Image (cartoon, rainbow, N blue to C red):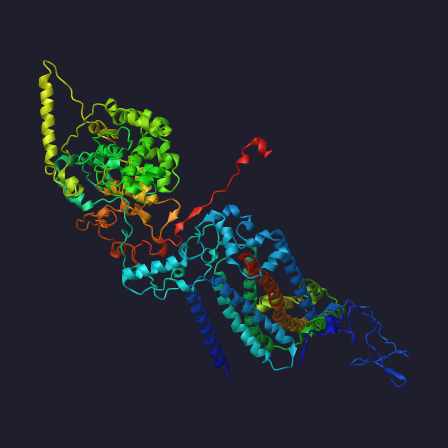
Amino acid sequence: MKLIHRRTINCILLLVAMTSISVIWQLGQYSFSNQAFVSGWLLFGSVMLLFLLTLRKRIVGGSFFKVSAWLQMHIYLGLLTVYVFLLHAGPYWPEGNLKQLLYLLFVLEVVSGMVGLFISRKLPPYLARGEHVLYQNIRSRQQQICEQAEKLVKSSLQQTDSNTIGDFFQQHLLAFFLKPQHFWAHIFQSKKTTHTLEADMQNLHRYLNEDERQIINRLHELVIEKDQLDYQYAGQTLLKRWLFIHVPVSYALLLFAVLHVTLVYAYIGGS
Amino acid sequence: MRINLGNKKQHWVCGRALEGKSCLSGPDKQGQCHNRSECQPLKKGERWYCSRPMPCQQGPLPDGACAHQVGLCQPELSPKAKIARSNLWLLLAAFGMVLMLLATNAYSPGQLSQSHRVLEDQCQRCHSAGQLNKLAVLGLAFAPFQHDKENALCLDCHNLGEHAALAHGLPVAAQSVLTEKIQTHLKTTVHQDSKIDKLPLDGLSCISCHREHQGGSLQLTGISDKTCQSCHLQSFIHFELHPEFSLYPYENKSNILFDHQSHIGKNFAEEEDLKQYAPENCNDCHRADGDGAFMQTKGFDKTCNNCHLQDIQGAAQTAAKGIEVFNLPGMDVDTLRTKGLVTGYWPENADAPLSGYMRLLLADNAQAVSALGRLGKLDTLDLRKATQEQLQAATDLMWSIKQLLFELQQNGQAVLISGLEKAVEQKIYPQQFAGLVNGLSPAVIDQALKNWLPGLKDEILLYRQGDLAALAALKPAEQEPKPEVTPQTKTKSTASDDLLGDELLGGDDLLSGDDDLLSDLVDLSEDKAADETNDVGRHTVTAIAEEEWVSAGGWYRSYYSLYYRPSAHADKFLQNWLELCTQSSTNVLKQVCKRIATPKAQGMCLKCHSTGDKGRINWRSKKPLADRQSFTRFAHNPHTTITETVNCISCHRLSETVQDKKNTEFHTGFQNVVKSQCSDCHNQVRPASENCLKCHNYHTGTVALKLNKTDLSLLDKKRSK
């Protein structure tokens, strides 16, 4: 199925679901039952279904639909859950510590989810443009590049008997090569900091002789390679790390939701 | 299929992975590095080989150890393990927070409304869970919901009547009756499918409509119209679609029967002598209550007194202005004596039948009751054809009456209580009794008995001794005093004929009727003139009749009867006797009530005071009770204060003149209020609210807050210690 068709169908299903819930909500106003219970259980059920994605990912084999299909369900159900949440809690900051905590966790969960969805769609094409490096090899590769740069600088000292490159390296490039740099600049596709570094290197040319220029050119190549690695590192780190917020918060959300439900039924006098 | 819970070996990775020099074996499960060499040489045959993908040039040592020795690394957690660990820590933190919330009761869902703010720290006042420990609270969540138990906590402070949980606080049967009534009036089956029979029999819970913990500005009584329309199935979103009003606001009988049309159209306008007292606007008789919501009627003294006081005092009565209470009935004494019965002295001129009051007071006298039963309807003034038994009954009755009056004279008013209580079959309380006798003085009784039954004391003593011979020997002639004639004078009423109305007089013409009476008047006046002329040179003063003497009300004597003439408005005697008529329905009392409980009776109480449920008399004009609510409410303020164009007649329009023929029939004199008078402002365009609760109450009947009980022992310092 084409992507556009799939999305169209999913959006229609989402709208139908929202409409159905709205109709039920409106009809429920003409009753003595507390609509908060209806929306609350709907919300809790949605959250549980969303949570099932984590479990589905751990199942190997079996016929429970593909994880990609589960992910699609997770995304659209998540959007529906936002709507149900607004029906249940309202679009305003609630009162009460527990309710505020739940509200905060849910908002965090939604925001992290939406951010994760966005970056998981946007970042991979950008990352695929350059040389693809496995995440676990990035640091070792960066270490190698750093060692190469250090060797190059040492050789420049021996060959040219000048500290220009060495001083420049010490001041501007050492920190750059030692660990991943410009994380957020790479995330927001900004080359400003890298260009600044390159410009500084270019400006150094006037103070170098021919041999030193070759060395600085080689350093420049290493800078570019390192920058590309940093780009990969930033992108892949973000792709992996956003789940560090999304998944743990979901556990906490679930725990506090159970507490919320328990206390609600306890304080109205039973279920 | 299997569930991947994560490879434990992958929890730790070699610390040199960042350098690109991770070892092949990696750390153990506990994250300990045991590898001191760059590789683990493999033995093939007798030789050792480097196991790295790119074997080193040196190769392993002869003993199989790697030639490149390195120090131990510091293993690191794998990314998955880091995620898992962060999850665990967050979960633990969350769990800790849960425990902290439970321990500190910091899980309140929000601020209470202003009216309940004082209970902020007293969860147990409204929640049964608040009375339990934490574990029990969590367990309660799984217990079945008992709304009556939770409701009881609300009803600890809020008194909403006996059926608080039922719709409108009414039992189901009452709801059905009301529904049928509405359908009959509206001639519609609009409520036919209402949910009355579908509501839970044991009622609703308070939280169905009242949901707290939504902040201090919450109006706890603000219920959505949709909630009302859960039961009232004729859903309408605007007041213009509300069903037309039915008999509003005159569905219930007014307490004071007042014909506005007659008074405004005729009495106030045409009666010349009453014009000076006539009100000029509605406010002269009506005023708003303290809240400005309810229009009350000013008291009799400020509204009706000037025109109607004389009516009450009997100025226009053609018959006796007073009520005959005590009397000596007429007896055929001659026949009784001829037949040998000992009667003692009995005035021969007494000719009235035994009054109802006397029958009532004799109710505890077995002899009198028996005698009256035996006499039946026999006319005691002519006993010539009476049987011996009836003659004896008449004699017994006479002695019973004498004993009653003797006891009254000797022992005072208290002797009447037992007779009254026996007659009405209920206890008479002191305050009520005081009203029933209203100032009956010993002097009145003494004077009456002195005139009616001289020598009563001696007779009673002999009678009680059983000395009939001595009784018979008593000479009546010595005892009979000079009869005192107290003529009744007729006075023409100074009030308007229209006010009295033909109905008041029962169609009697003032100038018609008893010619003898008129001739008596002529005789008396002639006698009076003769008196004046017989006394030479001196003026004589003829005392007025006793009835006229007590023009301000009180006891008076006329012939062989003691009358009570009503005083001004709210006479205690009449009020208490009429109240007694509504409380008891014994046959003996009915005879009294027939005389006084009519619109034309002395005092004319029931001409203006309507009767309510179970015959109860409405003494006061209607006032809203502070702790009672009806289905509808209307506040005159601000309706009559907002704009000059809105006044009483904007809603209250007079209908045709009606006559109150019976006290129980109700005619308002006003046209019913119609919906359009309200919907002109209460609509979707104008700012006046259309909300159901603007005009309707859900809780009807008793709606009040309960006061906390304070044990008096707390005030006593000795006991409180």
Identify which residue is drawn at 66% across, 65% down. B87
Identify which residue is drawn at 30% across, 42% down. B374
Q: Position of residue B623 (x, y in %)?
A: 32, 43
- Residue in the foreground of this view, choosing between B65 and B494: B494
Q: Quadrant of residue B304?
A: top left
Q: Position of residue B492 (x, y in %)?
A: 13, 33
Q: Position of residue B691 (x, y in %)?
A: 35, 56
Q: Determine if residue B556 is in view.
A: yes
Which quadrant does the C terminus of chain B fall into?
Answer: top right
- Residue in the foreground of this view, choosing between B223 and A118: B223
Question: Among all residues in the image, which is located at the extreme top?
Answer: B537
Q: Please give left or right for residue B23 compared with residue A93 in the image.
A: right
Q: Please give left or right for residue A108 compared with residue B665 in the image.
A: right
The vertical placement of B628 against B516, above or below, is: below
Identify which residue is drawn at 19% across, 27% down. B486
Q: Quadrant of residue B717?
A: top right
Q: Position of residue B345 (x, y in %)?
A: 27, 28
The vertical placement of A165 against B327, above or below, is: below
Q: Please give left or right for residue B404 compared with residue A231 in the image.
A: left
- Residue in the foreground of this view, choosing between A170 and B622: B622
Q: Quadrant of residue A51?
A: bottom right
Which quadrant does the N terminus of chain B fall into?
Answer: bottom right
Q: Determine if residue B330 is in view.
A: no
Q: How many marks?
A: 0
